[in-house]
Amino acid sequence: MHRAFQFLVPAVVILAIVGLSHQIVTNPLGLLRTLLFIALFIVGIFVVYRLFMMKQYGTPFLPQRSGPSRKQLQKAKRTSTVNKSAPSKFPLRNVQSPTSHSKVAPLKKKKPVQRNRSHNLTVIEGKKNKKKNRALF
């Protein structure tokens, strides 16, 4: 079956190219009319689908995308996972208040979180090839 598709798909693509080129040479207006009909058919299916969705779920005909875009979400994810100990562009001045001269304890370095690689799967031993005796109804 897989081997048949190996030859069938390229054959269909080649025949489509030959037919399209023949249609362009012999009847370009008919080709444009066919393409216009296909485009109108797709638009009609889209309109029917959107009307169905409006009635069924109360969604607008052409919904406006709300919230952040995918690019904004990726940027937020990158900036939230940036190493906090990295030096910033604008180093802060070491300003000390005159009343507090106590030393601050150094921060402890956190250990990396290790994933638990064990799983909850168990092996059930038994006769795998034994066929069940079932009555046919």
Image (cartoon, grey):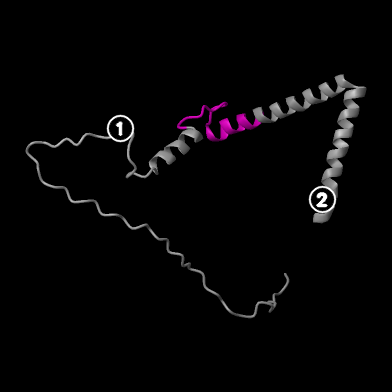
Q: Position of residue 77 (x, y in %)?
A: 43, 41
* Image point (58%, 33%), residue name: 53
Boundaries of the magenta span? 48-68
Q: Count residues near mark 2 (Cα–Cα under 10 Å), then give few for <14, some for 14-19, many for 20+.
A: few
* Disc 2/disc 1 C-alpha distance (Å): 62 Å
* Image point (43%, 64%), residue name: 116
Q: Position of residue 68 (x, y in %)?
A: 46, 32
Indicate the amino acid at tag 2: Phe
Indicate the amino acid at tag 1: Phe
Residue 90's mark?
1
* Residue to which mark 2 is pinned: 5
Residue sticking out furthest to the right: 26
Vertical relation: 87 (above or below) 109:
above
- Residue 30 lies left or right of residue 109; in this view the side is right
Q: Count residues near mark 1 (Cα–Cα under 10 Å), then give few for <14, some for 14-19, many for 20+.
A: few
Q: Is residue 54 magenta?
A: yes
Quarter of the image where one finds residue 129: bottom right
Q: What is the secondary structure assignment of the residue under circle 2? A: helix
**Dividing the image into 4 quarters, which one contains the C terminus?**
bottom right
